Image: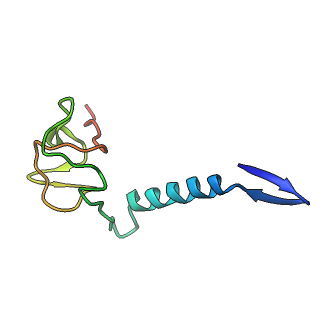
Amino acid sequence: MARIHNGNLHFSRRAWLIGGISAGWASALLVGEAGARAKLSKEAVRFSAAATDGKTCRSCALFVEPSSCTFVEGTIDPNGSCWIWRAKDG
């Protein structure tokens, strides 16, 4: 949270922490001009070999056939699932 003290703008530690975390995740998920993207580990996205609520990697918009993901590194089981699952358009 921001406040003004002696004419200067000050931010709380919580505001800096939340801003730093948000900026870190945003930079990890954005695509650069060259199309390079930093991929996240399976641990970071809580990857599971068992699907949750029918949300399999195969049904995710981020899944790339036959066994990879736009955002997660390594070989991806099409029947797995993680917290960044996104519905396919249409």
Which of 82 and 78 lies nearest the eye of the viewer? 82
Spot occupied by residue 23 in the image (x, y as percentages of width and height): 51, 59
Query: Which part of the image, by quadrant, shows the C terminus?
Result: top left
Left or right of 4: which side holds 84? left
Above or below: residue 72 compared with residue 35 = above
**Left or right of 78 in this view: 8:** right
Quarter location, residue 20? bottom right
Seen at 35% across and 70% down, the residue is 34
Q: Quadrant of residue 69?
A: bottom left
Total residue callouts: 0
The residue shown at (63%, 52%) is: 14
Which residue reaches farthest front? Answer: 13
Q: Can you name the residue that lies furthest to the left here? A: 66
Say which residue appears at 28% left-offset and 35% top-offset.
89
Residue 5 is situated, as x and y percent measured from the top left of the image, at: 87, 57
Q: Residue furthest right?
A: 6
* Quarter holding residue 42: bottom left
Residue furthest toward the bottom?
Answer: 34
Seen at 8% across and 52% down, the residue is: 66
Q: Taking 56 as reference, is 71 left or right?
A: right
Q: Nearer the viewer, residue 9 or 36?
A: 9
Q: How is the image coloured?
A: rainbow
Q: Position of residue 50 (x, y in %)?
A: 13, 40
Q: In the rendered view, does 52 fall on the left or right side of 11?
A: left
